[in-house]
Image: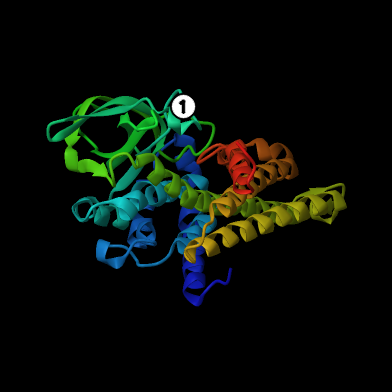
Amino acid sequence: MDISEEHEALRKTVREFATEEVAPVIGGFYEREEFPYDLVATMGRMGLFGLPIAEEWGGMGGDYFALCLVLEELARVDSSVAITLEAGVSLGAMPLYRFGTTEQKQRWLPDLAAGTRLGAFGLTEPGGGSDAGATRTTARRDGDSWVVNGSKAFITNSGTDITSIVTVTAVTGKREDGRKEISAVIIPSGTPGFGVSQKYSKVGWNASDTRELSFTDTRVPAENVLGQVGRGYAQFLSTLDEGRVAIAALSTGLAQGCVDESLKYASEREAFGSTIGTYQAIQFKIADMEVRAHTARLAYHAAAAKMLKGLPFKKEAAIAKLVASNAAMDNARDATQIFGGYGFMNDYPVARFYRDAKILEIGEGTSEVQRMLIARELGLAS
């Protein structure tokens, strides 16, 4: 996909921000498991949270590919910051932008687009995982309200000091075919009965916010339904397709970051009288890493191109997510090997990359789910 002058200028600006402002401090946030509010505020002032949102709602009026380029550049340095942006836009703001009423957009979208507030989306449940159709959280209509009961797990951006809303999927009845009717309901932070757990103790993404949520007779106005009643699951499936392209871009950034760090280290580290970059074993390993990053980039660019043209892109999104997350995991492992003992030390970025990479093969659809989607799009029976 061709990169316009505007896209290239944005990419360079974010690359400079990531290198000069994120890289020097993010290790401390990561070690302290602390959310980087100042960095998020800066990204908000840069307009990054509003990139694919129209100007009338406080956004930048750009496209989703611009967001993907930004995520790649951020993840070359750190994935916690990148996933905070990705989840804030693709899961927090975009469902509201795509399916919200004018009143809902007026109330919440400008702050989300400005990055002064964060939104989250609650789909996954403790016993559900990839089986979103097994949703147990319920929303019962009671007069002019919906009363929500249930729980959600692994929800990004759901418990920060600037979180304003969490949109959750909930069972609101039965369809004619007997299956569950699932709707999406917007729940503002601080609503009575809306409980937010302590932060998870995670392997990676330690400077991002991830929590379990509970709902106990949580009452919200009837107008807080997002989109049509009974269309919540379908709406979120389309949201996931876009999100998978974004996660592929983030994964590509991590994969490329592993190449960047390995190149620097291989040109400085000496062993047996020469820098290790002169040895063919290291050269071949880094060459394979670059191939993976390059292939991942081509895959998400191809998916983004179809998405922007309004063409079906479900298969391409699944391919991009699968290829890029595999590239991230493989490159993180190889980079750690190149660094040797230092790759096992949290002082070095590749240690963070290694810890952050695995979730990319799980979140927003596991690798197994991506293969299932690809097979279905090829016409194979499920």
Give the percent coordinates (x, y) of residue 31: 49, 36
Q: Write down the quadrant of residue 120 in the picture.
A: top left
Residue at image location 45% in from the left, 33% down from the top:
132
In the displayed structure, would residue 211 be above or below residue 288?
above
Q: Nearer the viewer, residue 1 or 349?
A: 1
Give the percent coordinates (x, y) of residue 378: 64, 48
In the displayed structure, would residue 288 be above or below residue 216?
below
- Residue occupying the far bottom of the picture: 5
In the displayed structure, would residue 243 be above or below residue 220?
below
In the displayed structure, would residue 17 be above or below residue 194?
below
Q: Nearer the viewer, residue 270 or 238?
A: 238
Give the percent coordinates (x, y) of residue 9: 48, 72
- Residue occupying the far front of the picture: 176
Q: By what rule are the colours in the image chosen? A: rainbow
| Residue 73 in view of the camera | yes
Task: Locate the N terminus and report the quarter of the image it occupies.
Answer: bottom right
Q: Nearer the viewer, residue 57 or 84?
A: 57
Residue at image location 36% in from the left, 52% down from the top:
94
| Residue 25 in view of the camera | no
Residue at image location 68% in from the left, 40% down from the top:
342
The kind of residue tagged 1 is Gly
Q: For numbered disc 1, what is the local secondary structure?
A: loop
Task: Locate the C terminus and report the quarter of the image it occupies.
Answer: top right
Give the percent coordinates (x, y) of residue 139: 26, 30
| Residue marked by disc 1 | 128
Tag count in the figure? 1
Residue at image location 64% in from the left, 60% down from the top:
298
Would you call the spot at circle 1 few (<14 residues within 10 Å), some (14-19), or many (20 or more)?
Answer: some
Q: Write down the quadrant of residue 188 in the picture.
A: top left
